[in-house]
Image: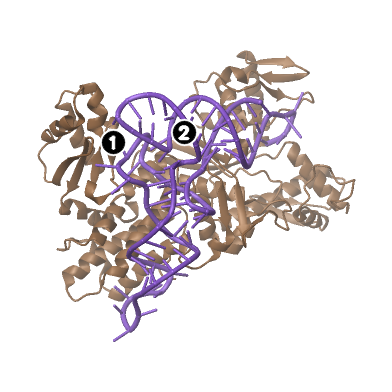
Amino acid sequence: MKANLTTLLYHAIQSLNVVISEEQITLERPKLIEHGDFSTNIAMVLAKQVKKNPREIAQSIIDNIEKNNLFKKIEIAGAGFINFFLKNEALISVIQEILQQKKAYGRNTKGGNKKIQIEFVSANPTGPLHVGHGRGAAIGDSLARLLEFSGWQVTREFYYNDAGAQIDNLTKSVKARCLNIDVDNDDFPADGYRGDYIKEIADSYMMGLSINCGEEIIESHGDIADDDCIKKFSVAYLRNEQDQDLANFKIKFDVYSLESSFYKNKKVDEVVSLLKSNGFTYEKDDALWLKSTQFGDDKDRVMKKSDGSYTYFVPDVAYHLDKWERGFHRVINEQGADHHSTVNRVRAGLQGLKKNIPLHWPEYVLHQMITVTKGGAEVKISKRAGSYVTLSDLIEEVGCDATRFFLVSRRPDSQLIFDIDLAKTQSNDNPVYYIQYAHARIEGVLKQWGGNINSLSNNHPYSYDSLLEKKLIKKISEFPELIETASKDLAPHQIANYLKECAAEFHSYYNDSKFLVKDESIMLGRLSLIYATQQILKNGLSLLGISAPDSM
RNA sequence: CUGCCCGUAGCUCAACUGGAUAGAGCACCAGCCUUCUAAGCUGGGGGUUACAGGUUCGAUUCCUGUCGGGCAGGCCA
């Protein structure tokens, strides 16, 4: 509908001999019902260029709109808004559209089936996943679903560091625990990991357990002197645990990339020699530096440390070169904002390769920190992890659906307060239940009715005259526009907000109206509206990876 | 000290990227179940959008500065 209107407007403006692109025409959904179904400010935008009063321009645009039978009326309002009021038939046609397209309703082809990669979570295997990873997981996975729905060919990817200093640190920590060195003991590694889980790993290692890690089975022989074996075992143990957490969070990845693989396949060497031969490096203080300031970084960065090993961003650049060579049109990295300093470095490194990689490739979605509260007080630690709240604690305490909803429901760039008490309440306080309840309520009515559900997708002679019906129809018809803006903005929280509003419109309607009435045309008309609403709720929830229960 | 993000009702958050009278939910007050799920609905009070300037027909949104919070600025990731 919106697209149709835009085209109509475009033609009307062209016939005024005004140069304009179709993208410049913005159509809005007015907040107030008195402002019609759609509204545009295009006359005010054109006022400067045309040098005429906006209201005059608006009038000539209206006069030039091609004949059609969509509108009840078109008005000029305020400083020069053009407000469109659609005919009833045009408005209610959305119900049949939804019921015919079902789970495909709202889908679009903006992505043109091009390849896009979303990297998210990317936790290092040095401990259990924490809430921050959970936020990344919820946002990243919803983004993936949203972009698939928008016609992109999506690859979900997880990258982890299985090679650097942090892994050595993990190994030392586990080893210390194998030797029964307590975390308070002076002999325990100064920067070691102190959570109880380290003790669990050590115990399992000493017992000679084996870990089933993908296709590989990692065995331990309980040999305390074998650092390499401790390392492999610990990494496998934690990877295994993280996979379990992610599975419980209903998240699947298509590809796992290992930092070590970019050393093995010489990608790191390739990157370093390219940067060298392109003249973007220099030696200083026994180290090799990247002239990242030439690409907008605020200082140059060390690539190769004085001990001969590379800093973390070098394999990161190699990894992104690998992504580029795999042919992704777009790459989105979802990460915690505490990693924002890597953005400039990775992009600078890629530019230095002179491979014609676009300036803003890859894109980043950075999420801010999370505060978890319970009983009004901040929760800072989990017993197992020691210094932070784990994702599995949350899932266990409030469930997967509520956890996902709360973690995805805020703009990524604002700090989030996760209220465990609120997420746990099974009442109207809790938006997840509020939305799911709307879905279940509709299912209840449809079950009670017991008729042929498919017959609802036919046209029914009912005019939807009540205000609540009009508002609900308006809301569900906005779903395709929501998908477009949410995926353009990489902002899945918009889906969560929308679903709350949609559920609210439904609950009001439900409370006000009777569905199973004697008059069949009224009944079928109303049932098809709520059936369409249910479909919208289901489609929206599935974009967030949240279940749509038939009863509660 | 420098860079990035944020600052909206008592609390948690929106606001279609510059639009019309800034919206929801909690909390508070007053109502609605012999009728399809009350996990619901209806009504009410609550705001100088941190502050001060600027840009223009029009600013929560863009620019500058100040204040406050978070995160970075390690040859850690």
| Mark 2–mark 1 distance (CA, rounded to whole Å) | 26 Å
Respond whether the residues carrying marks 2 and 1 are from the same subunit: yes
Give the label, 2 or 1, closer to the camera. Answer: 1
Is disc 1 surrounded by few (<14), some (14 to 19) or many (20+) residues within 10 Å?
few
Kindly identify the residue that appears in the image at 90 percent across and 46 percent down.
A186
Residue drawn at (21%, 22%) of the image? A51
Check the picture and name the quadrant holding the N terminus of chain A. top left
Q: Colour of chain B?
A: purple
Residue at 27 percent across and 67 percent down: it is A453
Q: Which mark is residue A330?
A: 2
Residue B60 found in image quarter: top left
In this view of the protein, can residue A229 be seen by the observer?
no
Badge 2 local density, few (<14 within 10 Å), some, or many (20+)? some
Q: Observer-nearest residue: A61 or A227? A: A61
The secondary element bearing badge 2 is classed as strand
Q: Is residue B34 above or below residue A536?
A: below
Chain A drawn colour: brown
First in residue order: circle 2 vs circle 1:
1
* Numbered badge on residue A26: 1
